[in-house]
Amino acid sequence: MSPTDRPRDHAGQGAATTVAAHRTRRRLRADRARQLADLLRRQLLTGAYQDGTLPHESTLATDYRATRNTVRQALDLLRAEGLVDRLPGVGTVVVARKYPHGLDRLMGLAETLREHGRVTNEVRTMGPSPAPAPVAERLHVAAGADVLCIERRRRLNGLPLSLDLTYIPLDIGTALLDADLENTDVFRLLETITGRPLGHAEITLEAVNSDAHSAAVLEAPRGASVLMLERLTHLDDGRPVDLEFIRFRGDRITMSGLLHRS
């Protein structure tokens, strides 16, 4: 290598180092913005900003020991989630809220959200249907036996909140065919029909992308993430009586619970 080539090599190495350092700074700022967005989201969901307006960016930067750029990036993340918006002459304001769904007790949706408004149910389909093998197995009915299948769109204060698909053993479900499912939780009806209280439920919660059907029913963007709650509910004697697949709009619900370590 000739001596005249060496300075050029050093210059190239210096440029590469500068680019790498810049990328590292951008990644760190993005990390801090995401972390700040998590903290601010918690404040939004717990009603910390009663007047609906967030503090000025400079105040947030001071309170959270962040740079103004980091604060702006964090607010951009919350704006992309549809939780806040920026209004000229006003600042950043809360434009949507999420409703808390507790995971501590076994309750129907209307019971869970009674403090936040009125839950109404639109029964889209209902009737006997042969149980798919996984449904029959979990409900302890014979393979291919009919079960009651119900699909409902549920609204809170008129806004679409969830799309529920429910399977119930037919010896219990037949009595639901004439019940007021539009204004009454299935849980209450099951206890009335069986004469027994509900006992416990097994739940699985995961995020899934909405398909075209569920997105249209929930009036959500196609492909938007939804919270999928799978719940198998048992009577107090252990009999499984209700298998549900519930798709919640992720921008309108938040799940919370109290866990104990024994």
Image: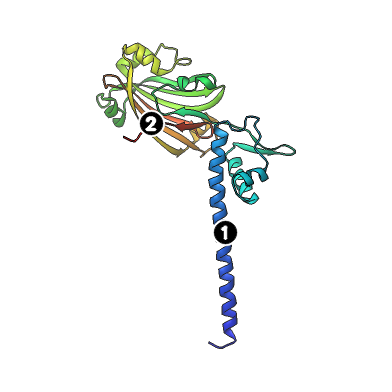
Q: How crowded is mark 1: few (under 14 residues within 10 Å), some or many (20 or more)?
A: few
Q: Mark 2 points at which residue?
A: 230
177 versus 252 height, above or below: above
Secondary element under disc 2, as helix, strand or loop, is: strand
Q: Residues within 10 Å of mark 2 (few under 14, many from 20)?
A: many
Give the mark, 2 or 1, whose residue is nearer the N terminus. 1
Cα gap from disc 2 to disc 1, whole angstroms? 41 Å
Residue positioned most to the bottom: 2
In the rendered image, residue 69, in percent from the top left (x then y), is placed at: 64, 51
Q: Answer with left or right where residue 98 lies relative to residue 142.
A: right
Q: Can residue 136 be seen?
A: yes
Q: Can residue 210 be seen?
A: no
Quadrant for residue 111, please give it.
top left
In the rendered image, residue 181, in percent from the top left (x then y), is placed at: 44, 16
Q: As rendered, which of 200 and 204 lies closer to the eye?
A: 200
Which three-letter amino acid code belongs to the residue tagged 1? Arg
What colouring does the structure picture have? Answer: rainbow
Q: Mark 1 points at which residue?
A: 25
Q: As rendered, which of 157 and 78 lies closer to the eye?
A: 78
